[in-house]
Image (cartoon, helix red, strand yellow):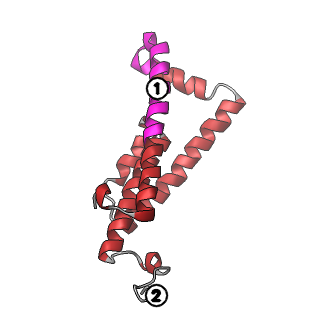
Amino acid sequence: MRFREVRGRDRSLCVLYGVSALIGVAVMGTLAVMFVVENADAGPGGVVTAFLRDATSNPASRFIYADLVLTWAALGAYMIVEGRRFGIRHVWAYIVGAPLLALIASYGLFMLVRQLKIAAGRDTDDLPAHGRAGRRSATGAPGR
């Protein structure tokens, strides 16, 4: 399903997920470029080494870094489960993309694709059973 075909709540969620991914790319990309420029004289390997050093240099940064890594792992598992459930291809790219882009960017993009699959399933009545449970038919009867 294409975005222009999505309506209602699905469209609002797609916009939310897409905007969060774009903001994530803009903010995190800007910060990444600033860090690389600041450490460019160290070379590519030196930039990575400097990043890991700075990310783990004190208890506060270690806390944030550990939280981010654990969140990435949990979201990776969620993306695998949801990817299989909705037939989303190349889920590995969203997971690998998180540390390369930013978790907010890859997760927001994954959620956008997931919502498009959900919206497409509503049109073809191809949702998983629990996705239909709250739906009502045109007559007002509960969905199947």
Q: Residue at x 44, y 29 (%)?
A: 29
Q: Which residues are magenta?
A: 22-46
In percent of width and height, residue 4 lies at 30, 56
Q: Is residue 21 visible?
A: yes
Q: Is residue 125 above or below residue 93?
A: below
Callout 2 touching callout 1 (CB < 8 Å): no
Amino acid under disc 1:
Thr
Residue that mark 1 sits on: 30
Label annotation for residue 17 = none
Residue 36: x and y in percent read 45, 19
In the image: residue 69, left or right of residue 14: right
Bin the neighbour count of mark 2 within 10 Å (Cα to Cα): few under 14, some 14-19, many 20 and up: few
Residue 80 in the image: state x and y as whole percent.
42, 59
Residue at position x 45%, y 83% from top? 136
Q: Is residue 64 left or right of residue 128?
A: right
Q: Is residue 8 magenta?
A: no
Residue at point 40%, 54% (across, down): 112
Q: Which mark is residue 140?
A: 2
Disc 1 element: helix
> Which residue is pictured at 42% across the width and 40% down the height?
22
Residue 83 coordinates in the image, percent (x, y)? 38, 61
Quadrant (top left/top right/bottom left/bottom right) for the C terminus = bottom left
Q: Distance of mark 2 from mark 1, alpha carbons? A: 50 Å
Tag 2: amino acid: Gly
Q: Name the side, left or right, on which 103 lies relative to 11.
A: right
Residue 41 painted magenta: yes
The quarter of the picture where the N terminus appears is bottom left
First of labels 2, 1 by sequence position? 1
